[in-house]
Image: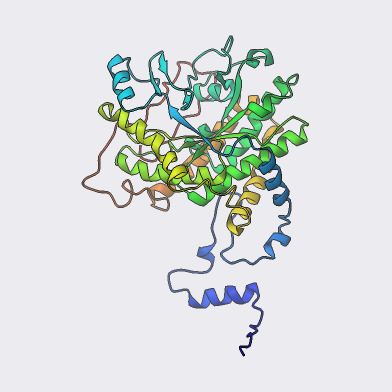
Amino acid sequence: MSQIQEFPEVDLQQWADRVKKELKAPHTFESLQWQVSEFFSLDPVYDATIFEKENLGYLQSFHKRWAEHRNKERPDILAFADPFQDENQEQFTIAEAYNFQAWVSGSNLKHSADLPVSTRFPDSEILNLSVNAEADPLMDGLLTGKWKSFKGSDLEKCTVHIHASDIHNAGGSAVQEMATALLAAEHYRQVMHGNMQWTNSAVIHLGIGPLFWLELAKIRAMRLLYINFCEVNTLEVKAGNIRTETSKLYWSKTDSELNLLRHSSEVMSSVLGGADQILVYPHTFEKEKTLDANRLAVNIPLLAFEESNLLTHFDPASGAYILEMLTHKLAEAAWKLFSEWNETGFENMVKNNMLQTEIQKSAEVLKNKFATKEIQMVGVNVFSSPMAKSSPGFPVYPAIEHPEFQPLAPVFLDA
Protein backbone atom coordinates (compact mmCIF):
# COMPACT_ATOMS: atom_id res chain seq x y z
CA MET A 1 0.00 0.00 0.00
CA SER A 2 1.58 3.26 -1.12
CA GLN A 3 1.69 6.24 1.14
CA ILE A 4 1.27 9.83 -0.02
CA GLN A 5 4.30 11.82 0.94
CA GLU A 6 3.60 15.25 2.33
CA PHE A 7 6.10 17.92 1.35
CA PRO A 8 6.70 20.95 3.53
CA GLU A 9 5.21 24.18 2.21
CA VAL A 10 7.75 26.41 0.50
CA ASP A 11 7.22 30.16 0.61
CA LEU A 12 8.22 32.72 -1.98
CA GLN A 13 11.30 33.86 -0.07
CA GLN A 14 12.68 30.32 0.00
CA TRP A 15 12.30 30.10 -3.77
CA ALA A 16 14.09 33.41 -4.17
CA ASP A 17 16.92 32.30 -1.86
CA ARG A 18 17.36 29.09 -3.87
CA VAL A 19 17.52 31.02 -7.14
CA LYS A 20 20.14 33.38 -5.70
CA LYS A 21 22.21 30.43 -4.49
CA GLU A 22 22.23 28.63 -7.84
CA LEU A 23 22.85 31.68 -10.04
CA LYS A 24 26.32 31.82 -11.55
CA ALA A 25 28.28 35.00 -12.29
CA PRO A 26 27.81 37.40 -13.96
CA HIS A 27 24.06 36.92 -13.44
CA THR A 28 22.42 38.31 -10.32
CA PHE A 29 18.94 37.95 -8.92
CA GLU A 30 18.29 41.61 -9.64
CA SER A 31 19.28 41.17 -13.29
CA LEU A 32 16.46 38.65 -13.72
CA GLN A 33 13.89 41.34 -13.07
CA TRP A 34 12.19 42.30 -16.34
CA GLN A 35 12.12 46.06 -16.87
CA VAL A 36 9.11 45.93 -19.14
CA SER A 37 8.69 49.65 -19.62
CA GLU A 38 9.63 52.99 -18.10
CA PHE A 39 6.66 52.55 -15.77
CA PHE A 40 7.05 49.11 -14.19
CA SER A 41 9.00 45.84 -14.01
CA LEU A 42 8.12 42.21 -13.22
CA ASP A 43 9.72 40.09 -10.52
CA PRO A 44 11.48 36.84 -11.52
CA VAL A 45 9.70 34.61 -8.96
CA TYR A 46 6.06 34.53 -7.95
CA ASP A 47 3.29 32.34 -6.54
CA ALA A 48 -0.49 32.19 -6.74
CA THR A 49 -0.94 34.78 -3.98
CA ILE A 50 0.09 37.49 -6.44
CA PHE A 51 -3.47 37.51 -7.84
CA GLU A 52 -4.82 38.47 -4.42
CA LYS A 53 -2.03 40.94 -3.61
CA GLU A 54 -2.50 42.80 -6.89
CA ASN A 55 -6.31 42.46 -6.79
CA LEU A 56 -6.47 40.84 -10.21
CA GLY A 57 -9.91 39.32 -9.77
CA TYR A 58 -11.42 41.94 -12.07
CA LEU A 59 -9.63 40.35 -15.03
CA GLN A 60 -12.02 37.41 -14.82
CA SER A 61 -15.03 39.65 -15.41
CA PHE A 62 -13.16 41.37 -18.25
CA HIS A 63 -12.51 38.00 -19.84
CA LYS A 64 -16.20 37.09 -19.55
CA ARG A 65 -17.41 40.35 -21.10
CA TRP A 66 -14.96 40.00 -23.95
CA ALA A 67 -16.03 36.39 -24.63
CA GLU A 68 -19.72 37.33 -24.65
CA HIS A 69 -19.50 40.41 -26.86
CA ARG A 70 -16.68 39.75 -29.31
CA ASN A 71 -17.66 40.27 -32.91
CA LYS A 72 -16.22 37.08 -34.37
CA GLU A 73 -14.01 34.13 -33.54
CA ARG A 74 -11.70 34.32 -36.54
CA PRO A 75 -9.66 37.46 -37.27
CA ASP A 76 -9.81 39.10 -40.68
CA ILE A 77 -6.65 38.86 -42.75
CA LEU A 78 -5.87 42.18 -44.38
CA ALA A 79 -3.79 42.75 -47.49
CA PHE A 80 -1.50 45.76 -47.67
CA ALA A 81 -2.45 48.12 -50.49
CA ASP A 82 0.75 49.87 -51.51
CA PRO A 83 -0.07 53.38 -52.79
CA PHE A 84 3.51 53.96 -53.93
CA GLN A 85 3.59 51.62 -56.90
CA ASP A 86 3.17 52.72 -60.49
CA GLU A 87 0.15 51.53 -62.41
CA ASN A 88 0.90 48.35 -64.32
CA GLN A 89 -1.96 46.31 -65.73
CA GLU A 90 0.34 43.39 -66.42
CA GLN A 91 0.95 43.02 -62.70
CA PHE A 92 -2.79 42.62 -62.13
CA THR A 93 -2.82 39.69 -64.55
CA ILE A 94 0.11 38.07 -62.80
CA ALA A 95 -1.54 38.64 -59.43
CA GLU A 96 -4.65 36.82 -60.54
CA ALA A 97 -2.50 33.88 -61.65
CA TYR A 98 -1.21 33.76 -58.07
CA ASN A 99 -4.83 33.64 -56.88
CA PHE A 100 -4.09 36.88 -55.09
CA GLN A 101 -7.04 39.22 -55.57
CA ALA A 102 -5.91 42.12 -53.38
CA TRP A 103 -3.88 44.58 -55.33
CA VAL A 104 -3.52 48.31 -55.65
CA SER A 105 -1.66 50.43 -58.13
CA GLY A 106 -2.08 54.17 -58.06
CA SER A 107 -5.80 54.88 -58.03
CA ASN A 108 -6.69 51.46 -59.45
CA LEU A 109 -7.81 49.18 -56.63
CA LYS A 110 -8.93 45.58 -57.03
CA HIS A 111 -9.83 43.29 -54.18
CA SER A 112 -12.24 40.55 -53.18
CA ALA A 113 -14.60 40.66 -50.23
CA ASP A 114 -12.79 37.68 -48.72
CA LEU A 115 -9.51 39.57 -48.50
CA PRO A 116 -10.06 43.13 -47.25
CA VAL A 117 -7.53 45.70 -48.33
CA SER A 118 -6.11 48.30 -45.97
CA THR A 119 -5.19 51.64 -47.49
CA ARG A 120 -4.18 54.89 -45.91
CA PHE A 121 -3.63 58.28 -47.49
CA PRO A 122 -2.84 60.79 -44.71
CA ASP A 123 -2.67 63.75 -47.08
CA SER A 124 -6.26 63.27 -48.35
CA GLU A 125 -9.19 65.42 -47.29
CA ILE A 126 -11.66 63.98 -44.82
CA LEU A 127 -14.80 65.69 -46.12
CA ASN A 128 -17.27 63.80 -48.35
CA LEU A 129 -15.71 60.43 -47.63
CA SER A 130 -17.56 57.42 -48.99
CA VAL A 131 -19.43 54.84 -46.97
CA ASN A 132 -17.16 52.45 -45.02
CA ALA A 133 -14.07 54.59 -45.66
CA GLU A 134 -11.35 54.37 -43.03
CA ALA A 135 -11.08 57.85 -41.49
CA ASP A 136 -8.53 58.99 -38.94
CA PRO A 137 -8.01 62.76 -39.28
CA LEU A 138 -6.35 62.96 -35.84
CA MET A 139 -3.46 60.57 -36.42
CA ASP A 140 -3.23 61.56 -40.10
CA GLY A 141 -2.68 65.16 -39.00
CA LEU A 142 -0.06 64.08 -36.49
CA LEU A 143 1.71 62.10 -39.21
CA THR A 144 1.78 64.97 -41.71
CA GLY A 145 2.20 67.97 -39.38
CA LYS A 146 -1.07 69.59 -40.47
CA TRP A 147 -4.08 69.78 -38.15
CA LYS A 148 -7.33 68.59 -39.73
CA SER A 149 -10.42 70.24 -38.29
CA PHE A 150 -13.59 68.21 -38.65
CA LYS A 151 -17.14 67.86 -37.35
CA GLY A 152 -19.02 64.76 -36.31
CA SER A 153 -21.12 64.97 -39.48
CA ASP A 154 -17.94 64.63 -41.57
CA LEU A 155 -17.47 61.10 -40.25
CA GLU A 156 -21.07 59.88 -40.28
CA LYS A 157 -20.51 57.62 -43.29
CA CYS A 158 -17.06 56.50 -42.22
CA THR A 159 -15.54 54.03 -39.82
CA VAL A 160 -13.39 55.79 -37.26
CA HIS A 161 -9.87 54.40 -37.11
CA ILE A 162 -7.24 55.26 -34.51
CA HIS A 163 -3.73 54.54 -35.81
CA ALA A 164 -1.99 54.19 -32.47
CA SER A 165 0.45 52.01 -34.43
CA ASP A 166 2.04 55.29 -35.58
CA ILE A 167 3.28 55.74 -32.01
CA HIS A 168 4.86 52.28 -32.02
CA ASN A 169 6.47 52.90 -35.40
CA ALA A 170 7.89 56.21 -34.16
CA GLY A 171 9.65 54.42 -31.28
CA GLY A 172 7.06 55.06 -28.57
CA SER A 173 6.53 52.58 -25.74
CA ALA A 174 3.58 50.21 -25.42
CA VAL A 175 2.16 52.38 -22.63
CA GLN A 176 2.44 55.53 -24.74
CA GLU A 177 0.82 53.77 -27.69
CA MET A 178 -2.24 52.75 -25.65
CA ALA A 179 -2.48 56.11 -23.88
CA THR A 180 -2.47 57.87 -27.27
CA ALA A 181 -5.25 55.57 -28.51
CA LEU A 182 -7.37 56.58 -25.52
CA LEU A 183 -6.50 60.26 -25.95
CA ALA A 184 -7.62 60.14 -29.59
CA ALA A 185 -10.75 58.20 -28.61
CA GLU A 186 -11.62 60.94 -26.11
CA HIS A 187 -11.24 63.61 -28.81
CA TYR A 188 -13.48 61.64 -31.17
CA ARG A 189 -16.00 61.17 -28.33
CA GLN A 190 -16.24 64.91 -27.85
CA VAL A 191 -16.70 65.55 -31.58
CA MET A 192 -19.12 62.63 -32.07
CA HIS A 193 -21.19 63.36 -28.96
CA GLY A 194 -24.45 62.90 -30.84
CA ASN A 195 -23.48 59.44 -32.10
CA MET A 196 -23.38 56.81 -29.37
CA GLN A 197 -22.74 53.83 -31.67
CA TRP A 198 -19.47 54.87 -33.33
CA THR A 199 -17.48 53.02 -30.69
CA ASN A 200 -18.82 49.66 -31.87
CA SER A 201 -17.39 50.05 -35.35
CA ALA A 202 -14.27 52.05 -34.42
CA VAL A 203 -10.96 50.28 -35.05
CA ILE A 204 -7.83 50.73 -32.95
CA HIS A 205 -4.57 49.96 -34.75
CA LEU A 206 -1.66 48.58 -32.73
CA GLY A 207 1.87 48.04 -33.99
CA ILE A 208 3.12 44.59 -32.99
CA GLY A 209 6.85 43.97 -32.63
CA PRO A 210 8.79 40.75 -32.03
CA LEU A 211 8.72 41.05 -28.19
CA PHE A 212 6.24 38.20 -28.01
CA TRP A 213 4.89 38.32 -24.44
CA LEU A 214 4.76 42.10 -24.22
CA GLU A 215 2.88 42.48 -27.51
CA LEU A 216 0.44 39.70 -26.67
CA ALA A 217 -0.40 41.35 -23.34
CA LYS A 218 -0.62 44.79 -24.98
CA ILE A 219 -3.50 43.65 -27.20
CA ARG A 220 -5.41 42.32 -24.19
CA ALA A 221 -4.67 45.46 -22.16
CA MET A 222 -5.86 47.71 -24.99
CA ARG A 223 -9.15 45.84 -25.18
CA LEU A 224 -9.57 46.09 -21.41
CA LEU A 225 -8.86 49.82 -21.53
CA TYR A 226 -11.24 50.45 -24.42
CA ILE A 227 -14.10 48.59 -22.75
CA ASN A 228 -13.45 50.56 -19.56
CA PHE A 229 -13.23 53.86 -21.49
CA CYS A 230 -16.62 53.23 -23.11
CA GLU A 231 -18.26 52.21 -19.84
CA VAL A 232 -16.92 55.27 -18.01
CA ASN A 233 -18.33 57.52 -20.74
CA THR A 234 -21.59 55.52 -21.06
CA LEU A 235 -20.88 54.72 -24.69
CA GLU A 236 -22.26 51.66 -26.43
CA VAL A 237 -19.54 49.07 -26.96
CA LYS A 238 -19.33 45.34 -27.56
CA ALA A 239 -15.71 44.37 -27.13
CA GLY A 240 -13.88 46.80 -29.37
CA ASN A 241 -12.17 46.17 -32.72
CA ILE A 242 -8.40 45.86 -32.63
CA ARG A 243 -6.32 45.70 -35.79
CA THR A 244 -2.71 44.66 -35.40
CA GLU A 245 -0.03 45.58 -37.91
CA THR A 246 3.41 44.03 -38.12
CA SER A 247 6.08 46.42 -36.91
CA LYS A 248 7.78 48.93 -39.18
CA LEU A 249 10.13 49.79 -36.32
CA TYR A 250 11.70 46.31 -36.45
CA TRP A 251 11.42 45.91 -40.23
CA SER A 252 14.82 45.22 -41.80
CA LYS A 253 16.14 46.23 -45.20
CA THR A 254 19.55 44.68 -44.47
CA ASP A 255 18.32 41.10 -44.25
CA SER A 256 14.78 41.25 -45.57
CA GLU A 257 14.04 37.53 -45.51
CA LEU A 258 14.37 37.49 -41.71
CA ASN A 259 11.39 39.85 -41.65
CA LEU A 260 9.36 36.72 -42.33
CA LEU A 261 10.48 35.25 -38.99
CA ARG A 262 9.70 38.44 -37.13
CA HIS A 263 6.32 38.62 -38.83
CA SER A 264 5.58 35.04 -37.76
CA SER A 265 6.20 35.95 -34.11
CA GLU A 266 4.13 39.13 -34.48
CA VAL A 267 1.23 37.18 -35.99
CA MET A 268 1.38 34.67 -33.13
CA SER A 269 1.13 37.54 -30.63
CA SER A 270 -1.78 38.95 -32.61
CA VAL A 271 -3.75 35.71 -32.78
CA LEU A 272 -3.15 34.64 -29.18
CA GLY A 273 -3.78 38.19 -27.95
CA GLY A 274 -7.19 38.15 -29.61
CA ALA A 275 -6.80 40.64 -32.46
CA ASP A 276 -9.88 41.14 -34.65
CA GLN A 277 -7.91 41.99 -37.79
CA ILE A 278 -4.31 41.24 -38.75
CA LEU A 279 -2.29 43.15 -41.33
CA VAL A 280 1.11 41.74 -42.31
CA TYR A 281 3.35 44.04 -44.30
CA PRO A 282 5.47 42.62 -47.15
CA HIS A 283 8.89 41.39 -46.05
CA THR A 284 10.58 43.07 -49.03
CA PHE A 285 9.87 45.94 -51.39
CA GLU A 286 11.87 44.65 -54.34
CA LYS A 287 9.61 45.27 -57.33
CA GLU A 288 10.32 41.94 -58.95
CA LYS A 289 9.29 40.17 -55.73
CA THR A 290 6.21 42.24 -54.88
CA LEU A 291 3.71 39.51 -55.71
CA ASP A 292 5.58 36.86 -53.75
CA ALA A 293 5.99 39.21 -50.80
CA ASN A 294 2.28 40.03 -50.66
CA ARG A 295 1.31 36.39 -51.06
CA LEU A 296 3.62 35.36 -48.20
CA ALA A 297 2.27 38.18 -46.05
CA VAL A 298 -1.25 36.79 -46.41
CA ASN A 299 -0.13 33.18 -45.93
CA ILE A 300 1.59 33.76 -42.56
CA PRO A 301 -1.68 34.27 -40.66
CA LEU A 302 -3.35 31.56 -42.75
CA LEU A 303 -0.70 29.10 -41.54
CA ALA A 304 -1.25 30.27 -37.97
CA PHE A 305 -5.00 29.60 -38.30
CA GLU A 306 -5.14 26.46 -40.38
CA GLU A 307 -1.93 24.54 -39.64
CA SER A 308 -0.84 25.75 -36.22
CA ASN A 309 -4.44 25.80 -34.92
CA LEU A 310 -3.84 28.91 -32.83
CA LEU A 311 -7.59 29.60 -32.87
CA THR A 312 -8.44 26.39 -31.01
CA HIS A 313 -9.08 28.16 -27.70
CA PHE A 314 -10.39 31.62 -26.89
CA ASP A 315 -7.84 33.78 -25.07
CA PRO A 316 -5.39 31.00 -24.13
CA ALA A 317 -3.34 33.58 -22.19
CA SER A 318 -6.05 33.89 -19.55
CA GLY A 319 -4.84 32.78 -16.12
CA ALA A 320 -1.10 32.77 -16.89
CA TYR A 321 0.81 34.84 -14.31
CA ILE A 322 3.14 36.70 -16.64
CA LEU A 323 0.40 37.61 -19.10
CA GLU A 324 -2.25 38.53 -16.55
CA MET A 325 0.29 40.65 -14.68
CA LEU A 326 1.47 42.26 -17.90
CA THR A 327 -2.13 42.96 -18.93
CA HIS A 328 -2.84 44.52 -15.54
CA LYS A 329 0.36 46.57 -15.32
CA LEU A 330 0.15 47.82 -18.91
CA ALA A 331 -3.49 48.82 -18.52
CA GLU A 332 -2.83 50.50 -15.18
CA ALA A 333 0.14 52.51 -16.49
CA ALA A 334 -1.59 53.46 -19.76
CA TRP A 335 -4.75 54.68 -18.01
CA LYS A 336 -2.68 56.78 -15.62
CA LEU A 337 -0.70 58.33 -18.50
CA PHE A 338 -3.89 58.94 -20.49
CA SER A 339 -5.43 60.70 -17.49
CA GLU A 340 -2.40 62.99 -17.23
CA TRP A 341 -2.34 63.78 -20.96
CA ASN A 342 -6.09 64.30 -21.05
CA GLU A 343 -5.69 67.32 -18.77
CA THR A 344 -4.08 68.98 -21.80
CA GLY A 345 -6.08 67.26 -24.53
CA PHE A 346 -5.07 65.69 -27.84
CA GLU A 347 -5.16 68.89 -29.90
CA ASN A 348 -3.00 70.91 -27.49
CA MET A 349 -0.61 68.00 -26.95
CA VAL A 350 -0.04 67.77 -30.71
CA LYS A 351 -0.02 71.45 -31.67
CA ASN A 352 2.48 72.26 -28.89
CA ASN A 353 4.69 69.26 -29.83
CA MET A 354 4.27 67.81 -26.34
CA LEU A 355 3.20 64.38 -27.53
CA GLN A 356 5.92 64.27 -30.19
CA THR A 357 8.57 65.17 -27.58
CA GLU A 358 7.50 62.34 -25.29
CA ILE A 359 7.62 59.84 -28.14
CA GLN A 360 11.06 61.10 -29.23
CA LYS A 361 12.43 60.53 -25.72
CA SER A 362 11.31 56.91 -25.83
CA ALA A 363 12.69 56.52 -29.34
CA GLU A 364 16.14 57.74 -28.22
CA VAL A 365 16.18 55.21 -25.39
CA LEU A 366 15.20 52.49 -27.84
CA LYS A 367 17.90 53.47 -30.36
CA ASN A 368 20.56 53.51 -27.63
CA LYS A 369 19.54 50.01 -26.53
CA PHE A 370 19.74 48.87 -30.14
CA ALA A 371 23.20 50.42 -30.55
CA THR A 372 24.48 48.61 -27.45
CA LYS A 373 22.75 45.36 -28.52
CA GLU A 374 20.53 45.34 -25.46
CA ILE A 375 17.82 45.13 -28.10
CA GLN A 376 18.80 42.64 -30.78
CA MET A 377 17.61 42.17 -34.34
CA VAL A 378 18.87 38.95 -35.85
CA GLY A 379 20.57 39.62 -39.18
CA VAL A 380 20.95 43.32 -38.39
CA ASN A 381 22.93 44.07 -35.23
CA VAL A 382 23.61 40.39 -34.32
CA PHE A 383 24.27 37.24 -36.37
CA SER A 384 24.59 39.00 -39.70
CA SER A 385 24.85 36.67 -42.67
CA PRO A 386 27.04 37.04 -45.79
CA MET A 387 24.07 35.55 -47.68
CA ALA A 388 21.67 38.25 -46.49
CA LYS A 389 19.29 39.61 -49.12
CA SER A 390 18.74 43.33 -48.86
CA SER A 391 15.63 45.25 -49.86
CA PRO A 392 14.72 48.86 -50.60
CA GLY A 393 13.62 50.67 -47.48
CA PHE A 394 10.06 50.68 -46.20
CA PRO A 395 8.12 53.37 -48.13
CA VAL A 396 7.17 56.41 -46.04
CA TYR A 397 4.88 59.33 -46.72
CA PRO A 398 6.77 62.45 -47.80
CA ALA A 399 6.81 65.36 -45.36
CA ILE A 400 4.69 68.36 -46.27
CA GLU A 401 6.23 71.78 -46.69
CA HIS A 402 5.87 74.25 -43.82
CA PRO A 403 4.13 71.95 -41.30
CA GLU A 404 2.05 73.59 -38.58
CA PHE A 405 3.76 71.46 -35.93
CA GLN A 406 6.36 68.73 -35.77
CA PRO A 407 5.21 65.63 -37.71
CA LEU A 408 5.49 62.26 -36.02
CA ALA A 409 8.33 60.66 -37.95
CA PRO A 410 8.69 56.87 -38.21
CA VAL A 411 11.83 55.28 -36.78
CA PHE A 412 13.58 52.29 -38.35
CA LEU A 413 16.11 50.53 -36.13
CA ASP A 414 17.68 49.19 -39.33
CA ALA A 415 17.96 52.70 -40.74
User: Going by the picture, which residue comes out furthest to the top?
Assistant: 128
Of 162 and 294, nearer the camera is 294
Residue at figure coordinates x 61%, y 49% from the top left:
39
In this rendering, position of residue 338 left or right of residue 300: right
Residue 36 point in image, percent of width and height? 55, 52
Question: Hey, which quadrant is residue 222 in on the image?
Answer: top right
Residue 408 point in image, percent of width and height? 50, 29
Residue at figure coordinates x 69%, y 65% from the top left:
49
User: Going by the picture, which residue comes out furthest to the front?
Assistant: 1
In this rendering, position of residue 290 left or right of residue 131: left
Give the vertical position of 16 relative to 257 (above or below): below
**In the rendered image, is residue 294 in sight?**
yes
Residue at figure coordinates x 64%, y 77% from the top left:
10
From the image, which quarter does the N terminus lie in? bottom right
Total marks drawn? 0
Question: Hey, which quadrant is residue 296 in on the image?
Answer: top left
**In the rendered image, is residue 170 in sight?**
no
User: Going by the picture, which residue comes out furthest to the left?
Assistant: 386
From the image, which quarter does the C terminus lie in? top left
Of 97 and 266, nearer the camera is 97
Residue 186 point in image, percent of width and height? 69, 29
Picture colour scheme: rainbow
Residue at figure coordinates x 72%, y 23% from the top left:
190
Residue 191 point in image, percent of width and height? 70, 20
